[in-house]
Amino acid sequence: MGISRSTYYYEPKGKRPPDIELAEAIEKIALDYPSYGYRRITAQLHRQGLKVNHKRVLRLMRDKNLLCRARKAFKVT
């Protein structure tokens, strides 16, 4: 044949979902579970069948101001 093996077996990636639709899904989960951070929301999106990177979820949550407050560690005095 005249093509390389990697080209023969290459499968193009599917299109990623637009940020608007993803932001709406993130916002719905964040409102249902206000204590969820970006890691749990990413896991929830994976369970719903959306393949999305945690860094993208974090960026969209920062843009929409949906990040929950981090707990302060208990300090023994």
Image (cartoon, rainbow, N blue to C red):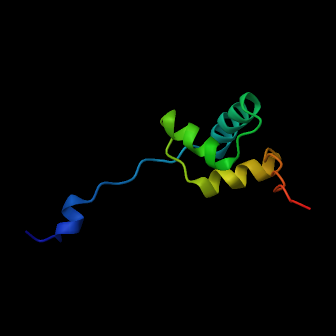
- Considering every residue shown, the one lying at the far left of the view is 1
Q: Between 4 and 41, which is closer to the camera in this rendering?
A: 41
Residue drawn 71% across and 50% down? 60
Looking at the image, which residue is at 74% across and 48% down? 61
Q: Quadrant of residue 23?
A: top right
What is the x, y in percent for residue 66? 79, 44
Image x and y of residue 7, in percent: 23, 65
Residue at the right extreme, as displayed = 77
| Horizontal side of residue 33 vs 69, given as left or right | left
Q: Residue at x 87, y 59 (%)?
A: 76
When the figure is inspected, residue 8 is found, relative to residue 47, above or below; the finding is: below
| Residue 72 image-quadrant placement | bottom right
Using residue 77 as the reference point, say whether residue 24 is left or right of it.
left
Between 11 and 74, the residue placed more toward the observer is 74
Q: Up-down: is 16 above or below 7?
A: above
Q: Position of residue 37 (x, y in %)?
A: 70, 46
Residue shown at the point (77%, 35%) measured from the top left: 34
